[in-house]
Each structure stands twice: as structure tokens, then as C-alpha cells.
Image: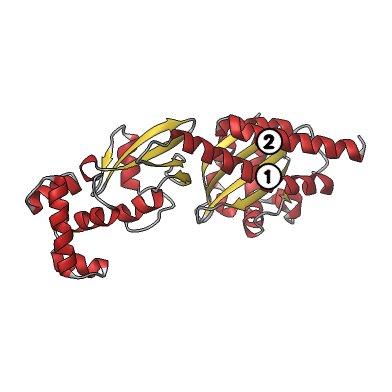
Amino acid sequence: MGETKNASEVSDFLLELYHDASECRPEELRLRVLQNLQRFIPFDFGVWGGGWANGRLVTDLTVLNQSEAILGEWDSVAQEDAFCDLTLNRLGTTARFDDVPNYRASLAFNEHWQRFDATHMMATIVGEKTDGYVSFVGLCAENRPMTFCDTQRRFKQLLMPHLSQALRMNRELWTGRAALEHEAIALIDREGWVLCTQGPFDDFAEHEWGGRIAQLPAHVMDTLKRGNRWRGEMLDVRLSPFGSNYFVHLSIHPALSSLSPREREVAGLFGSGMTTKQVARALGTSPSTVRNQVVRIYEKLGISSKAQLATLAGGK
């Protein structure tokens, strides 16, 4: 195959990649891309997923031609895996098993990878926009005497930014399609890690949980996974399945939707039991300003007491 034909085929691959990113669901996209990669790099099975780097926790995974147990059971050797150490320390750089000295004598290789016939692996890990969240693509070959060559490694590394960008674009498109007016929405994985957002998600999260969040609080996820809505001081939260992931929908309590963002903030603090002085101190304003805001809040909500406000703001 000549160099010109190679360049043409790569261009066709990228065009198809971004076209599929606009049409396919995330899991279908990843499978199609892995299958298409086999036209350029001979490998037997592949993995494309994401997770939390510090805990080496894989929470979002698509596997081609192999069992998901290849990473579902990897946690037993994750902390001892020198290949994972190498790729995490060189984010964005494609590495091979053979780059780790004596790797085939290691516990991780003999107790895990060999059980899945992964004689060779070539993998790249990249950091994503969510702090601490990484995505990875690994290509594996079974029972071969030869490693992946340098040309194949360079080609995969060249493609990796495109794969990451296409998946991010794909997730944002599907999240946007699922969004409703006056609602914030996020695509999350099975452990509650936020993959992408639409609408005022960060603003809503800051008011409810005190800051931007990379992962939904565990008690919220537990409630949602049981099939229940979660109700906080300001938010109603519900979950809807999307492949192996979820959409999480955040909306202001209907009773509070008529309030401005600042008024909702005051309502939440005052309704939680704070005095006007405490609310003023928390928001960096004056008690008289808070009292005027409380009066307007009462008028908008048609209530006349702090107890009624607590019921509306806190779901009590």
C-alpha cells in the first residue's frame, strides 16, 4: 500500500469517525471505531473506557472481541501493574508491554493479562476535562511472537487526540439532545462520575453541594439507583438510563423556579434555619438586603412564614 493511499485512507477514517460521532450512541461509536482501527493495525481485541486515575477504577468500558472481565477483574492487580504506572505517568503517550523491563515476569501479566490471551498490548491514557478522570484505548494481540511495531505505535498516538475529541463531542451532542428547558443535565458513568454537562449544571451543583463536582455524591447515587428521585434543599434530581451510562437531570424545585438565582440562594440558606445576619455574612451582603429579599421571596411564593419556606426549599 503506497503512502498516498495510506494518507487517503486515514482521511476517510477521520471523516467517518466524526460522522459517527454525530450519529451513533457512545457505546456504538466506540465499537465502530475499534473495528475500523483493525484496517490499519492488526489486533485481536480492544478496550476503550474511562475511570478515576487515583483509584485506578474503571467505570465506563466498551470491549471489542473480548469479555468485559478483562478490566472488570483487573482491580485485583491494578496497584501492582507497572504498565499502568507507565501509561499514567506519560499521559497522551502510547506505550507497549515491551516498554516495561521484565514485564512478562510480573504478577499483573501472569495473573491477569495472560489469562485473557493478551500477549501484547499497546495503550494510551489521556486526561479529560473532569479533574482526575482519564480515558484510555488499549489494543491487544494474542499468542504472537512479535510486538506492535514503532510505526503502529506512532499511528495510534497520532489518532488518540481525535478519538478523545470525537467521544467528547458525541457525549455532548447526546447530552444536549436529552436536555429540557429550565433543566441542567449531565452524562454520568455507573459510579456517578460526570462525563459531560449541558445547561447550568455547575451553578446548580454549587448551590446544592457547595461547589463544582466531578462525581455525584454517593448518597444521591444510591437513592437514584434504587429508582427514586432525590430531593435536596434546592434541587429535584432524577436518573434515566443511557446505554451503560446514565443521564442525571437536575431541576430547581418547581415552587422555587420563579425566584432569581440570588433569591433561591437566600431561600435555601434562610429556610435551612439561618438568621438574616447569618445569611448576610455567608453571602457577603447586609442584613437589611437579606430582609428585603426574604420579603420578595415570600411574595413570589405566596407564603408568610419561615416554616413554609423551609418546607418549599428543603422538601421537609
| Rendering coords of residue 73 (x, y %) | 54, 40
- Amino acid, disc 1: His
| Rendering coords of residue 212 (x, y %) | 40, 56
Outermost residue toward the left? 304
* Camera-side residue of 7 and 85: 7
Q: Judge whether residue 63 can be spotted in this image.
A: no
- Amino acid, disc 2: Leu
Q: Judge whether residue 289 can be spotted in this image.
A: yes
- Judged from the image, the secondary structure of the residue bearing numbered disc 1 is helix
Check the image and tell me how it is coloured.
secondary structure
Horizontally, residue 154 falls left or right of residue 170, namely: right
| Rendering coords of residue 301 (x, y %) | 15, 46
Tell me the quarter of the image containing the N terminus: top right
| Rendering coords of residue 296 (x, y %) | 16, 54
Marks 2/1 in contact by CB < 8 Å: the verdict is: yes
Disc sitting over residue 162 in the figure: 1
Residue drawn where x is 25% and y is 44% of the image: 257
Compared to residue 209, the image places residue 230 above or below, namely above
Disc sitting over residue 17 in the figure: 2
Binning the other alpha carbons within 10 Å of mark 1 as few (below 14), some (14 to 19) or many (20 upward) gives some
Q: Quadrant of residue 167?
A: top right
- Judged from the image, the secondary structure of the residue bearing numbered disc 2 is helix
Residue drawn where x is 77% and y is 34% of the image: 12
Q: Quadrant of residue 211?
A: bottom left
Disc sitting over residue 49 in the figure: none
Residue drawn where x is 48% and y is 38% of the image: 176
Binning the other alpha carbons within 10 Å of mark 2 as few (below 14), some (14 to 19) or many (20 upward) gives many
- Closer to the chain start, of discs 2 and 1, is 2
